[in-house]
Amino acid sequence: MNTRTAAALLCTTLAALLSTAPALAADKPGKPATGGLPDLTAEQLANAERVLTGKIACEFDQSVDISQGAKPGYFTVAFKGKKYTLTPEATTTGAVRLEDKKAGIVWLQIANKSMLMNSKAGQRMVDNCVHPSQKS
């Protein structure tokens, strides 16, 4: 897959994912969930198995650190000194989508790269994040 095709696929996937995102409740971003985490569905737990974890290098010498959360299926995503608790969400495209609905933070993982989005602002926080297993 060439770069132009990958970029077009990513844009299409991103537009589809963001357009189907539910309305988000206002909350202070950057605060990880604490205690009382609900159990996840079997589909969410299955999607969690596909999440790549570790320190992931991104564009402009930035990085995102993704680790297992306090409960199975939950993930802690750290970026620029802030931590978010994200859960897997179903997609129709096959992309991995993790989301913190209260903070509006979305992690999208496709075959060749990942990105961190702020769905409230409708913009990327960081792009071109490539886990070693995504390198071709």
Image (cartoon, rainbow, N blue to C red):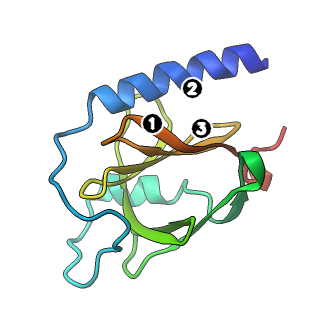
Residue at numbered disc 3: 110
- Count all numbered tags in the image, as a single digit: 3
Image x and y of residue 114, in percent: 61, 43
- Whether residue 128 is visible, yes or no, is yes
Tell me whether circle 3 and circle 2 mark residues in contact (CB < 8 Å): yes
Q: Quadrant of the C terminus?
A: top right
The earlier-in-sequence mark between 1 and 2 is 2
Point out the frontmost of discs 1 and 2. Answer: 1
* Element type at mark 1: strand
Pick the front one: 17 or 31 = 31
* Element type at mark 2: helix
* Element type at mark 3: loop
Point out the frontmost of discs 1 and 3. Answer: 1
The earlier-in-sequence mark between 3 and 2 is 2
| Amino acid tagged 1 | Gln
Residue at numbered disc 2: 10
Label 1 Cα crowd, 10 Å radius (few <14 / some 14-19 / many 20+)? few
Residue depicted at 35% across the width and 74% down the height: 32
